[in-house]
Image (cartoon, rainbow, N blue to C red):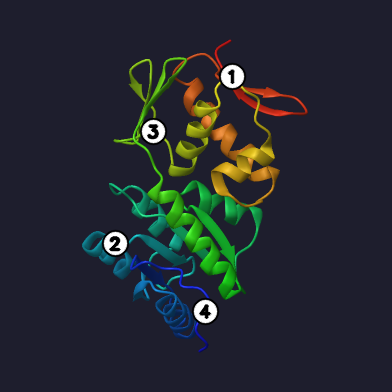
C-alpha cells in the first residue's frame, strides 16, 4: 500500500473495531503508515476490554458486530472516565441510525463505503479537539457544568446527560444569551452536516431533561435557531 503523502500521527494509539478482516487490515495498515499506533478488535467485548486496559486516544468503531451492538459499545465507552473520542464506521446511513449513534456518545459518524483520506482527516480533527479540552466550570441560569467531572446540575440537582447532549449544552452555555443557528450547532457540536432533524431531536431531549429541573432555558427563535437564557 502506498504511503500517505503526509505524516498525520504523533504516536497516538488508535483502536480499530470491525469484524470484517479486509476493512480492519486496510485501516490498520493505513493508520500505521500515517504514524499512529494501532490495535484491532473484532468483537464488542474485546473492544471494551482494550479500551479499559490500554486507554487508546481514539476508537474507530463498526456498528454491526457479532456480539455487542456497536451503539451499545459506544455508550459503555462514553461512560468511562476520560473516555476517548469515538468515530463510528457503518453501512447504516439513515437519520435514525445517525441520531442513535451520536446520542449514545459517538463524536463523529462515517458511512461505508468511505475514503481513506476522509478517515484520516476526521481522525485528525477528533484528536485535535480532544487535546484542546479545557476544565472550566460553566454556570448559566442555575445550570452548572463541571468539565473536570463531566457533571451537570441544575439548582443543585444532578442532570443525567448523554455525551452528545453534554456537548450541545456546553456549546449553548458558552454562547448563552446569543442565538445560534442549526448549522452552527452542527458545525461546533459534530463538525459535519447530519441534517436539521438530528439537531431538533437532540435539542428536544436536552430540553426535557433541563426543564424537568426548572423553568425552560432553551428557547427557539423561529427562523434563526436557539438561545440559552433565563426567561
- Which residue appears at 47% of the width and 53% of the height? 106
In the rendering, at what x and y percent does residue 224 appear? 74, 28
Element under disc 4: loop
Q: Mark 4 points at which residue?
A: 4
Q: How crowded is mark 1: few (under 14 residues within 10 Å), some or many (20 or more)?
A: some
Quarter holding residue 29:
bottom left
Image point (50%, 26%), residue name: 173
Mark 1, residue position: 177
Horizontal side of residue 115 vs 54, given as left or right: right
Which mark's residue is nearer the viewer, 4 or 3? Answer: 4
Residue under numbered circle 3: 160
Point out the tag, 2 or 1, that comes first from the N-terminus.
2
How far from the left and from the top, in percent, is residue 176?
A: 55, 22
Give the CA separation, mark 2 to mark 3. 23 Å
Label 4, label 1: how many angstroms apart (C-alpha)?
A: 45 Å
Q: Distance between the residues labelled 1 and 3?
A: 23 Å
Q: Let me know if residue 105 appears in the view.
A: no
Residue wearing tag 2: 51
Mark-to-mark CA distance, 4 and 2: 27 Å
Under tag 2, what secondary structure?
helix
Note whether 118 is above or below 150 in the view shown.
Answer: below
- Mark nearest the camera among 2 and 1 is 1
Query: In the visual, does 203 lie left or right of 51?
Result: right
Q: Which of marks 2 and 3 is nearer the N terminus?
A: 2
- Which of pointers 1 and 3 lies earlier in the amino acid sequence? 3
Q: Where is residue 228? Give x, y as percent.
A: 57, 22
Q: Quadrant of the C terminus?
A: top right
Q: For numbered disc 3, what is the local secondary structure?
A: loop
Q: Which residue lies furthest to the top in this view?
A: 231
Amino acid at each position: 500500500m502506498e504511503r500517505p503523502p503526509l505524516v498525520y500521527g504523533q504516536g497516538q494509539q488508535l483502536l480499530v473495531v470491525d469484524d470484517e478482516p479486509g476493512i480492519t487490515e486496510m485501516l490498520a495498515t493505513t493508520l500505521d503508515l500515517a504514524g499512529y499506533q494501532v490495535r484491532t478488535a473484532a468483537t464488542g467485548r474485546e473492544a471494551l476490554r482494550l479500551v479499559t486496559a490500554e486507554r487508546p486516544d481514539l476508537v474507530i468503531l463498526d456498528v454491526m458486530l457479532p456480539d455487542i451492538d456497536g451503539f451499545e459499545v459506544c455508550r459503555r465507552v462514553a461512560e468511562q472516565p476520560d473516555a476517548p473520542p469515538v468515530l463510528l464506521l457503518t453501512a447504516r446511513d439513515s437519520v435514525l441510525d445517525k441520531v442513535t449513534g451520536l446520542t449514545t456518545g459517538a463524536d463523529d459518524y462515517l458511512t461505508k463505503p468511505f475514503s481513506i483520506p476522509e478517515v484520516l482527516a476526521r481522525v485528525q480533527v477528533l484528536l485535535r479537539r480532544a487535546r484542546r479540552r479545557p476544565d472550566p466550570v460553566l454556570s448559566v441560569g442555575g445550570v452548572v457544568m463541571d468539565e473536570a467531572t463531566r457533571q451537570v446540575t441544575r439548582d443543585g440537582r444532578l442532570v443525567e446527560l448523554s455525551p452528545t447532549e453534554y456537548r450541545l449544552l456546553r456549546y449553548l452555555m458558552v454562547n448563552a444569551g446569543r442565538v445560534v443557528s442549526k448549522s452552527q450547532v452542527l458545525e461546533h457540536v459534530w463538525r459535519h452536516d447530519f441534517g436539521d432533524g438530528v439537531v431538533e431531536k437532540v435539542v428536544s431531549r436536552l430540553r426535557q431533561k433541563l426543564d424537568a429541573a426548572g423553568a425552560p432555558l432553551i428557547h427557539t427563535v423561529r427562523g434563526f435557531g436557539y438561545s440559552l437564557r433565563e426567561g
